[in-house]
Image (spheres, grey):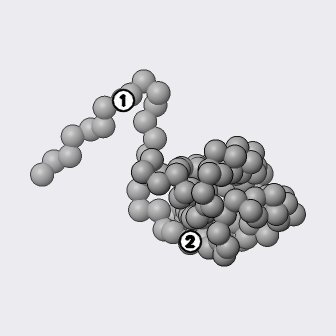
Amino acid sequence: MAKAVEVAWNLTPFRSDEFCEILKPYAERVINYGATGFMIVRQADDELIVKQYAWFEKKEDWDRYWNSELMQECRAKLLSHYAVPVLYTWQEVVTFNKFPDEAAVPAEVEA
C-alpha cells in the first residue's frame, strides 16, 4: 500500500506567496526520486500554514529526496520564511482518488 508524506511548513508572516513560489519547483522534482504524486496546499483561513504532500511506495525514496542536495538547497533558500524545525510525518494512505477534469460524479454508496 502506498504511503504519503506530509510536511507542515509554519511560515513567518507576509511571506507565504514568495514561499510557495520558491518551494513549487523543488516539490515538483520529487517525481525524480520515485514519488507517484505530489501536492502543495495552503490553508485558506490561515495562509501561514502550507502543507507539502508526496506519495511513495518506499520510505527510502522519500529519505533520498528529503536529504538530497536539492532539498538542502531548498530549505536554505526558504530559511527566513518558515519556523524551524520542519517536521514531516509518514502516513498510510487508506483511500485516494482524483476525478477527471470533466467533473465526474462519484458512484452512490449503498447504506
Q: Nearer the viewer, residue 15 or 43?
A: 15
- Location of mark 2 (residue): 90
Task: Please name the residue shown 70% across and 59% down the image.
Answer: 81
Q: Specify which label sits upstream in the sequence, 1 or 2.
A: 2
Q: Measuring 62% from the left and 51% from the top, which residue is drawn there?
A: 14
Residue depicted at x 46% and y 41%: 98
Q: Is residue 40 above or below residue 90?
A: above
Q: CA distance from mark 1 to mark 2?
A: 30 Å
Residue 95 in the image: above or below residue 106: below
Whole-percent x, y for residue 60 in the image: 71, 71
The dot on residue 51 is: none
Classify mark 1: residues with Cα within 10 Å, few (<14), some (14-19) or many (20+).
few
Looking at the picture, which amino acid does disc 2 mark? Trp
Indicate the position of residue 46 as horizontal and vertical percent values.
47, 54
Q: Which residue corresponds to mark 1?
A: 104
Q: Is residue 31 visible?
A: no
Helix, strand or loop for disc 2: strand
Q: Position of residue 44 (x, y in %)?
A: 45, 47
Q: For this rendering, which residue is in front, 13 or 6? A: 13
Residue furthest out toward the top:
102
Q: Contact (CB < 8 A) between labels 1 and 2? A: no
Q: Nearer the viewer, mark 1 or mark 2?
A: 2
Looking at the picture, how far across and down is residue 30, in whole percent? Answer: 72, 53
- Callout 1: SS: loop
Q: Quadrant of residue 61?
A: bottom right
